[in-house]
Image: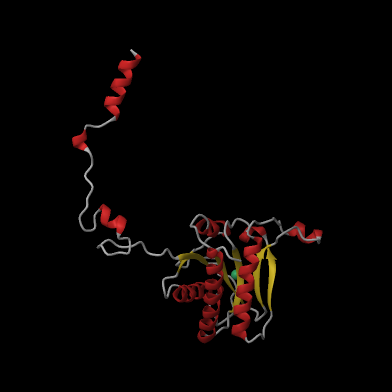
Amino acid sequence: MKGLLFAVALLLAVPPGDVRPEVDTGPGGFLDRLFNPAGKGDYPLPDRPSLLVILDPGHGGDDVGARNPGQPAEKELALRLARLIKQRLEKDGEIRALLTREEDTFLTPVERLEIANGQGALLYLSLHATGDGGASLLFVNAPQKPADPSAAGEWRYQNNRHDAANRRFAADLTAALKKRDGGAPEIRTVATPRLFLGGANLPAVMGEVIDLAAADEEQNRLADAVADAIRKSARRESSGVR
Ligand SMILES: [Zn+2]
């Protein structure tokens, strides 16, 4: 009985010789693709995948952000900057930039990070402006609970597995912004409340990078500088070489 079952199983498992799949040996066929991988056939080689980054224009909708009379609101300037930076980044196809909002829409901090997370992106930059002519500020997650207990009570700090990358990205942005400004204004990196960046599963920085009063020319220079920093950071993070 065992021998019979074995024979039946063998018959079912081995297809008769005349139904073997045919191997296409012509031009562009299986063998051609196997032995001529340099693209001699008419099949396309896969594109080199772009490095993906996320740009988050701060505020939006009812949340207008900072506002000074006679100047665009922070939400408008943030979206404008994000578009300018995206144009620069995507010039040569090396980098693709996804915006968390393309329109004047309201998003909570959590919704922004939900868009950013899970895309396989290398970096997240949330763009903000100041209305007081003050120093540029870059915000990263605090790496650890600060020594000052009152500050710990105010903000919920956490250890973030991207601490090191956050700081590398902030350093690249600082260097680029300083170059743009000729070293004049102060650029500081500070810790941010967990609400804003704590849920990011990629290296993330939030930046008040420009004043609401900035003219078109300054916006363009800022976009150049930020795009340079993002390109540098994205290349490094994707290469794995620190
Ligand atoms: Zn803001």
Q: How is the image coloured?
A: secondary structure
Which residue is depicted at the point 53% across and 69% down? Answer: 235
Give residue 103's position: percent from left, percent from top: 45, 67
Q: Nearer the viewer, residue 195 or 43?
A: 43
Q: Where the N terminus falls, by quadrant?
A: top left
Q: Is residue 159 left or right of residue 56?
A: right
Q: Is residue 112 visible?
A: yes
Which residue is depicted at the point 53% across and 76% down? Answer: 228
Q: Is residue 209 left or right of residue 15?
A: right
The image quadrant where one finds ligand 1 is bottom right
Give residue 88's position: percent from left, percent from top: 46, 76
Which residue is depicted at the point 30% across and 62% down? Answer: 44
Q: Nearer the viewer, residue 15 or 106?
A: 15
Q: Nearer the viewer, residue 112 or 232?
A: 232
How many discs mark residues in the rendered view?
0
Please tell me whether residue 102 is drawn above or below residue 19 in the rendered image: below
Locate residue 128: give its quadrant: bottom right
Q: Is residue 58 visible?
A: no
Please tell me whether residue 59 is drawn above or below residue 219 in the rendered image: above
Q: Where the C terminus falls, by quadrant?
A: bottom right
Q: Is residue 22 left or right of residue 202?
A: left
Which residue is depicted at the point 30% across and 64% down? Answer: 39
Q: Nearer the viewer, residue 117 or 212?
A: 117
Locate residue 197: give its quadrant: bottom right
Give residue 34's position: percent from left, percent from top: 31, 55
Please tell me whether residue 73 is drawn above or below residue 59 in the rendered image: below
Farthest residue, direction top:
1
